[in-house]
Each structure stands twice: as C-alpha cells, then as structure tokens.
Amino acid sequence: MGRKTPLFALHQELGARIVDFGGWDMPVQYGSQIGEHHAVRRAAGVFDVSHMCVVDLKGPRVRAFLAQLLANDVGKLKATGKALYSCMLNERGGVLDDLIVYFLTESWFRAVVNAGTRDKDLAWIRAHAASFGLELTERTDLAMLAIQGPEGRARALELLAAADREAALGLGVFVGRELGRWFVARTGYTGEDGFEIMMPAADAVPAWRKLNALGVASCGLGARDTLRLEAGMNLYGHDMDENSDPFESGLAWTVALEPPGRAFIGREALEAVRARGPGRKLVGLLLEDRGVLRDHQRVLVPGVGEGEITSGTYSPTLERSIALARVPAATPARVQVDIRGKLLNAKVVKPPFVRFGKSLVT
Amino acid sequence: MSNLPADLKYTKSHEWVRTLADGTVEIGITDHAQHALGDLVFVEVPEAGRTVKQDEPCAVVESVKAASDVYAPLAGEITAGNPALADAPETVNSDPYGAGWLMRVRPAAGAVAAAELMSAADYQKVVAAEGG
C-alpha cells in the first residue's frame, strides 16, 4: 500500500487502474491510454499530480541559496510568479533531480520536485539550507491538478471565480500566481498549453468532477508518459540520474555557466566536462521498422560504439515508436536497435517529436 | 467479469485454445489479458513451420506500456501466424476470440491434448485469484 492523494477514492470510482509510482498509488489509465493521450492533444485532459512534492522556501536569503543549489540561474527570475526549470546536481555534476522553482517574493520561492526523489531531495535541500537560515515547508496540504490541451485553459477558467479569470488568462508561459486559495501556473509536462493548479486538498474532488462535466477527460500517468516523451521532455530516473550530467542528458540549455562567479553545486565538475567535451549525448530515435522501442534496449552505432534507450514507447500521435537514447557523442543520423535479438533501423532526430498537436519529425 | 466462451480451453498464462475441424488448434489471448494489457500497438506472431514446446514463448504482444510474451499452450508446429495483426494489432483488443487470434498449431504426437487444458470455469478461478 502506497501513499494516496486526495483524489484516490475518485480515481477508483472512475474505474482507474492503480499502480505504484514512486511510492504512491496512482492511476495509470481510466479506459484507453491512447484515447486519453488524444484527448490532451486534441481537446483537454486532467491529471492528478498531487504526488509531486511542493516545498515553500522562505527567508531573506532564499535567492542566494537557490543560486548555489541549482544549475540554472534563479537570477533570471525577475518578474513575480515566473518559473524556472533546473537540475539540482551533486558535486560530481550528476543530476539529483529536476525541478521547477517559482519566484513569488524576494523572501518566498516555491519548488516542485519529483515524488520518487522526495526524501533524498528534502534531505539535500535541508542540509544545504542550514547556513542560510531558511524556513522549509512541504505543502502536503495541497493537491495539484494539471489541465492540459488546446482547450485546457478555457475549461480550467470555468473553475475560477469570475473575478479571477482575466488574471489567469493573462498568465504568460511558465508563470504562476495566487488566485484566492489556489495557485494557478501556466506550466505542464505534455507539450500542450494548459495550467497546473495547486489547491487545498478538499477542493480537488469537486474541481475534478466539474472538469469532467465540462468534457475534460480524466487522464492517467500512462498518457502523461507518452505525451511527455512526444514532447521530448526528460523523466528523472530514466533519461537522467545521479550518474549522468545535464550535458549528456539533453539539458545543456538548463545549465547557466554565466555569470562565471556563481558558485553552484556541481559547477566545477560541469566545467571539466565542458572543457573535454561530453562523451555521450541524449538524442531522439524514430523507429523505421515495425516494433516498439523500450527502456534499456541496446543501440548500435556502427563504427562508433553502443548506447542505450532511456525512454521508449509507442507514439499515439505519430503512430510509430519513438525513444530518447543516450549514445556516443559521435553518433551519426542512423542507428540500429536490438529488440529481442533483431536489429531494427532507427533514425536519429532532435526532440521534441510533437509540439502543440503537430508532428515535428519525419 | 470478462467474456469467457465455454467452448474454448484456457491456460493460467491467459491464452485460449480452440480446436479446429482439421485437428489443428487456434490460439489467442483472453479478453481478461487484452484488457489488462491495454491498447495493443504491436504484435509479433511466429512464422509457419516453427516447432514450439509447451510453455515456450512464441509470440509477443505489446501495449503502449509494455511487451508481454505469449506462451504455447501445447507442443507442436506452427501452421500460421495471423497476418492481419501486423497492420491492425488493436484487433486483439476488439475481438480477442475471433479475428484477433494469434497463431495456429498442429499438435505434436504425444503432446498435451487441448482437451486436457483448463475449462472456462477453472480459468475464471485463476482470474479471480489474481484479483481480476
């Protein structure tokens, strides 16, 4: 028996199949996983992401603390409510977790970290926060719903008080703000537009039911995984972990080596990697033959070496198999993948595969 | 409660077996199995002429989430793999006991006979024990 979100009983009532995810009992699908995927690409779907760990960091030195903790630079956060995606690294430059941090006030930032790494993350953050005199509060009182898809924001607006709708509609991409008792952010993990809304636990079930009544499909973690993979977004523990650095995880864009004076944890290790050049890279694969790419399948790069698939699946939008794979840096445009002893052809592409409902690869 | 035709035989690994008029058997996966797997997106069936032992993995059904082996309910020679599934793997979801059949086998001499496999009622107990 794992931990349960405030929506657990409703998931059961809706006929969800429940699986363990990072120690939580979560819905993987309600009916057809492919149907849920298409609902998000074509209209709107709602996901329970209450298992994710929301931590408020408060204190006058919180920005200085995060500047040291994170590989991306919270100095980029100038407008209230703006969010930043970043890796949190160990001293070796390995990825402890990826997270989103919101700038709310100069003495209040909010981080959202992965459910499966919660204990490790909190211990790490606490240990490093000690000398900054911060107050850390895990917001277990909040539920979080992700409403995603081309119609997601319009449907979600109907949950809000009339007076708050204009403010929510005016939110820029990757910006959040408090509206009444809710925190509404224009973020997501699907490659579609939408909101993620943090709300008091007691509000979650009525909000979900209202969304369903408005035609928003209940969607499970299965669809969430195919959507994020089509969108070329990494999943912690699959596409990166403590034994891989951001450069070999397709996350160089999240590492801020400027300004040079910002001494963040892992910086020295990353500078050494950059100086010698990363040996591996994370790429997208498009399977040209029939079959399904899966995690840990071997990627053969003739004349160069071998790599491994870090996330593989069937893409409902492209109707073929796609994957992220970590391969040697010198990998050319075509590789082979060993699927049950057969060598199948795959094309190397730059993720994302799908964005805003449209295929970006051929 | 999933659909379980009484005229078929079953295995605890969720295959069904139908004896055809010519003595060969047709094999597929049960309605319970297709439902548990979810939307199938790829099916690999064996080629005709291959000989298989009882309980040998001989086909693969892949849903969005995972790949699962299908085991030979009895020993014999494959006489056909269902060619329609390459283009339409979802047929196994929509018609698991009909057009979604996976393969046909000519039982080997001395092989466990189809008649000795589980009845629908016994298979139902297996499913119930799994919480299905």
Image (cartoon, coloured by chain):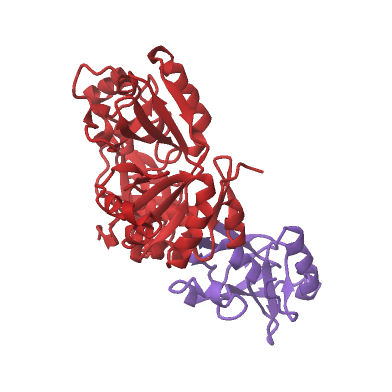
Say which colour chain A has: red
Furthest residue in direction front, as rendered:
A163
On screen, residue A77 versus residue A119, left or right, reads left
Is residue A260 placed above or below A50 in the rendered structure?
Answer: above
Furthest residue in direction top, as rendered:
A131
Q: Is A356 or A252 nearer to us in this picture? A: A356
On screen, residue B108 versus residue A318, left or right, reads right
Residue A317: x and y in percent read 35, 63
State the image quarter where residue A254 is shown. top left
Q: Quadrant of the N terminus of chain A?
A: top right
Query: What is the count of numbered marks?
Result: 0
Residue A278: x and y in percent read 28, 30
Residue B48 in view of the camera: no
State the image quarter where residue B16 is shown. bottom right
The residue depicted at 30 percent of the width and 27 percent of the height is A71
Say which colour chain B has: purple
Q: Quadrant of the C terminus of chain A?
A: bottom left
Furthest residue in direction left, as rendered:
A259
Residue A202: x and y in percent read 54, 48
The residue depicted at 74 percent of the width and 74 percent of the height is B9
The residue depicted at 46 percent of the width and 20 percent of the height is A126
Residue B119: x and y in percent read 79, 73
Residue A31 in view of the camera: yes
The residue depicted at 22 percent of the width and 25 percent of the height is A257
